[in-house]
Image (spheres, rainbow, N blue to C red):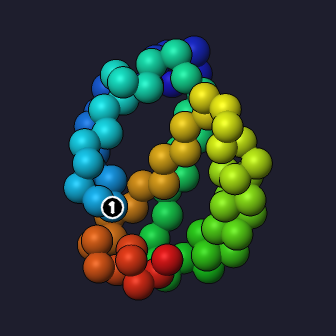
Amino acid sequence: MIGKALPDFNLSDIDGKLVKLADLKGKPIIINLWFAQCPPCIAEMPTLSVIKEKYSSTDIQFLSMTYETKEAVKKFL
């Protein structure tokens, strides 16, 4: 897929708001895929949070995607 566009997708954020890839077109996107029982995923979260804060005033979009339930994500956070 190198050099190919990311396939279009829609997803809901933790508050139920719809996020459309099409709405992010032209913006840099960092996508993190994780799950709550993954030790490397857990270990990287503080660093990703620092990076997100550092670039919060830029156009960079951070998407953290999981198959976990909303309740599990809130508990993890």
Residue 44 visible from this viewpoint: no
Q: Where residue 49 sits in the image (x, y, percent)?
A: 67, 61
User: Height in image: 71 above or below 56?
Assistant: below
User: Height in image: 26 above or below 74?
Assistant: above
Query: At 67% from the left edge and 37% from the top edge, which residue is drawn?
Result: 57
The residue at which mark 1 appears reads as 14
Query: At 52% from the left edge and 16% from the top edge, which residue is drawn?
Result: 26
Indicate left or right for 21 with 16 as reference: right
Using a 10 Å C-alpha cutoff, classify the residue at mark 1 as few (fewer than 14 neighbours), some (14 to 19) or many (20 or more).
few
Quadrant in the picture for residue 68? bottom left
Q: Where residue 74 sits in the image (x, y, percent)?
A: 39, 77
Which sits in the foreground, 22 or 17? 17
Residue 58 visible from this viewpoint: yes
Query: At 39% from the left edge and 61% from the top edge, which residue is drawn?
Result: 66
Which sits in the foreground, 52 or 42? 52
User: Height in image: 77 above or below 25?
Assistant: below
Which sits in the foreground, 25 or 43? 25
Quadrant in the picture for residue 28? top right
Counting labels gives 1
Indicate left or right for 70 with 5 as reference: left
Which sits in the foreground, 44 or 17? 17
Query: At 42% from the left edge and 55% from the top edge, which residue is drawn?
Result: 65
Q: Name the kind of residue labelled 1 in the image.
A: Ile
Secondary structure, mark 1, is loop
Q: Where residue 6 sits in the image (x, y, percent)?
A: 44, 25
Indicate left or right for 57 with 8 as reference: right
User: Height in image: 46 above or below 50?
Assistant: below
Residue lying furthest front: 57
Q: Where residue 22 sits in the image (x, y, percent)?
A: 34, 22
